[in-house]
Amino acid sequence: MAETKKAEAAAVAVPEGACAVDIRIFLLTITLSMSIAFWVGISVHLPFNSLGQRPSTVPAALEIEEPEIRTLELSPADYDMTDAHSPSGQHLLVDIQGIEAAFLDSEERLADAMVRTVHGAGLTMLSYHCHKLDPAGISCVGVLLESHISFHTWPEEGVITLDLFTCGPNPLLPVVPVIERLFGIQRSADEEVRVKWSHELRGFRKEDEKRTNYLDNFSDLSLWLLSPLELVSKTQVYSNITKYQRVDIWDFVEEADLPSYADGLKHNLPDGDERWEQPDLYTPDRILFLDGTIQSLYSAEATYHEALVHPAMFAHNAPKHVGVLGGGEGATIREVLKHKTVQSVTMIEIDEELIEISRQHLPQMSDCSDLVGRSDNCFDDQAIKVVTDNAVAYFHARHGPNRPIKYAPKPFDVLIVDALDPEDDVMFAKDLYADDVFLSAVLRSMSDDGVLMIQIGTAADLLDPKADIGVYQIRERMFNLFEEHPDVAAMFVFEEPESGFLEPHSFLVVCKDNRCRNKWNARSDAVDYEIYKRIVPTNSGQPALKYYDGAVQHGYQIPPKAWESVYCRREPAPFECSFVSLDFASEIHELRLNGEGSFRIELQKNEDGEVVDASVIANVDIPKGSFIMPDDLSKPLILGAHNVNAINTHDNSPTFKDLAAFIESWGHKSFAEGTDTRILEVGASTLIRKVHAGDINVGKWVPTHPSGKRPPYSPVYDRHPISFEVFLVALDDIPSGTELTRSVDDWTT
C-alpha cells in the first residue's frame, strides 16, 4: 500500500524544470514498442531469456550439438488438429530421476536445455523465466507461441519433472528422446537415469476425430502406453504406416511386473533374493498395435492364439486343410501347424508388409523351430500358402453366389478368422461380419463337416443392453445371419479371460454338422487323449501346448451368464428364456419313504404274492406347474454312447441284460442333436406309469421348442444341458388320490 501511495504522489508532483508527459501517451508508446518487438521476434524466430534478450553464447562446457529428432513417423495429420483455433492440444509430462545435482541447480544449463528442447520440437519460444530456490532447485517456465513449457528440479534427489503443452500441429512424441538426451545428465556411473513420461491429447475435439485418432484416449495405444505415467519403462520398437494400416510395436514394464519363473532361471536368482520383488529383472513385455488397437501381448499371446485355434481344430475329427483369415503376426498358423493331421494351410492376409514386420520384430509369434517336422519359421513351412489379398474379395471371387462350384478342390475343414473385432467402428468390420453374401461364401468354402472359428472381441457383460442397439450390433447381426443360415447346424460362444486384454475376449465356433457337438462337449480326459494323439512332439521335449488342455476345454463348454442374459434381451424373447431358472413360485412335491411326502406307492401283486405292477398316487392336491420329485430327478446317471455300447456287448450276462433293458426303458437320448449322451432316471420317478395316450398329468418341465428342434445358437440350452432334460411338472391340477401318469414319448418329442 505504501508503494502505491508513493507512485500516486510521483504522478502528481512534477519536479521543477521537468517535462510533463501525459501518462496515456507514455503507456501507448510502451505498448506499441512491445508489440513491435514481439512480432519482430516471431518473424525471425529468436528465443528470448528472462531479460528479454537473446541468450548469450553457450560456454564451451555446455556445448551440445543440435539434437536430432528420432522420428516416430508422425505427422500433423496423425493428430487431426488442422484447425488452429480448435480448443484442443497435446500435453507431454516427463519425470526423470538419477540426474547430476550440479546440472539441476544451474539456471544457465537448464535454460539452455529448455531452449534447445523447444527448438528441437519445432516450436517458438517467446520468453522464459527461471527462479532459483533456496537452498537448491530451480523452477522455469517458458512461454511459447504454441503454449508453454515448464519444469521444477530437486538437485539432491536428482529429479526433474517437466511438462510441455502445445496447441500447434507439431507432434510431441518425437520430443521425448530429445528431452531424455538434453536433461538426462547422469549423476553417477553406477546409477541409471530413469525416465517416465505421459502423452495426452487435451481439450475438446469432434467425436469422429477422437475415434479415428490413434493417439486419443479412445485408442488402446494411448490407454496402454502413451498415457500411463507410472510405467517403469516404455520403449518404441517399431512405428510406421504400411499401405493398409499403422503398425506400432513397443516394449514396456509396469511397476507391478516382477521377475517371472523364466526370469529367475535366466538371472540365477536364489530364494530370498530381494530382486524377486523388484521389476528390474523383469523381461519387458512386447505389445503390437494396429491403427492404435491392441492385437497381441508377448506374455499372453500363446493363451490367446491357443484359444483361437485349438477348440475349433479339436471340434473336427481330422482337419487336413485349414484356412486362416488375417493373422499376419504368424502365431495363428504356428498353432495350426501343431496338428499332425494338417496338410495345407492357406493364409489370406491383405498386408504383406505386416508379415515382414512381424518376422523381424515379433519373432516369437512365428517361431516353429521347436516343432518336430516343421520349418524354423512358420511362414517358411511347406504346408503354408500365403495369399496377399482382400479377404472379402478372395471369398467372393472363389465362393460367391455366381460360382457354380460348391467349394474348391480342397475345401477348408477348419477356417479361422483372426481379423479386427466386430465392435471396431470401421466399414471393413461390416464387410466382414454383417454381409450375408460374404458369410455365405465363407461357409461355401468349407467341407460339409467344416468348423469355423471367429474371434468376436470383448465378452458380453451382464449390464449390456440389447445386443442389436449397442456397440455390439454388428456382432449381433453376424449371429443372426449364422442362426438363419441353412448350412449352420451348431454355434458355440466362449470366453478366454487370460488373453492379455483388459477384459475377457470372446470367440464363436460355427459348425456345419451337428456331430461337432459331441467333440465340443467331450469329457476333459477324452480331449487330453486327443491332444496326446494329434499334437506334434517338440525338439525340447516340452509340451507344444502351453495352456490349452481338456480342463480348459471343459471350461469353454458352458457360456458365461452374461451371454445368456444378453441373448434373452432380444425382442421377442426366445422361447427357452422362460426356463433359465426353476420357478420359485411353483410348489415342490416329493416322495418320502416315511410316508410324509406328497405321494404313496401302491403295489399290485399276483396270487403268489409277487409284485407285478406299481403305481404312484397323489396324497395331496397338486397344482398345475408343480415340480414332481425334483430331488430324485436332479441326480440322473449320465452315460455316453460308449458306455451304453459296452453294456450291450455283455449280452451273455443276466445282470448286464437287465441293466441294458433298464437303460432302454428309463434312459433317454439327449435331444441335443449331434450328441450321444443318454440320461438315465434312477429314482422313484421310474415308478410313474408310462402310457401311450389318454389322461397324462405329468410331463417334462421344458416343452419342445416351437420349431421342433433345438436352435443352432442358444446360450440358454448350452448353460442348462441337463436340467432341461430331467425335471418333470404337473401338466394339470392333480387331485389327491389320483394316479400319476406320463407319456412314453415325453423325452423324445
Image (cartoon, helix red, strand yellow):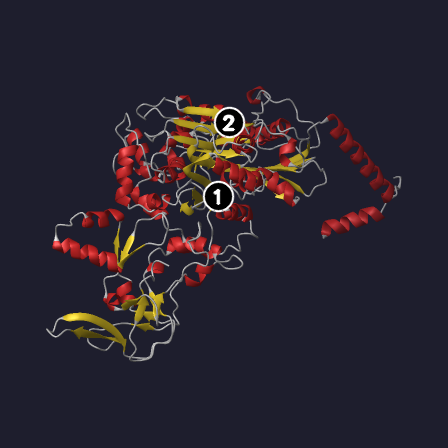
User: Is residue 660 or residue 54 the one in the foreground?
Assistant: 660
User: Is residue 543 or residue 64 the one in the foreground?
Assistant: 543
Query: Quick check: 613 above or below 365?
Result: below
Q: Which residue is mark 2?
A: 354
Q: Which mark is residue 457?
A: 1
User: Is residue 405 or residue 153 the one in the foreground?
Assistant: 405
First of labels 1, 2 by sequence position: 2
- What is the distance, in whole Å, between disc 1 and disc 2 at their CAs? 21 Å
Q: Which mark is residue 679?
A: none
Q: Position of residue 151 (x, y in %)?
A: 57, 37
Instruction: Check whether the beta carbons of the residues at disc 1 and disc 2 lie within 8 A of each other.
Output: no
Q: Amino acid at mark 2?
A: Leu
Farthest residue in the left direction? 608
Q: Position of residue 383 (x, y in %)?
A: 39, 24
Residue drawn 68% across and 34% down? 127
Q: Quadrant of the C terminus?
A: bottom left
Q: Secondary structure at mark 1?
A: strand
Other residues around mark 2 within 10 Å, as few (<14) / some (14–19) / many (≥20):
many
Q: Position of residue 740 (x, y in %)?
A: 30, 72
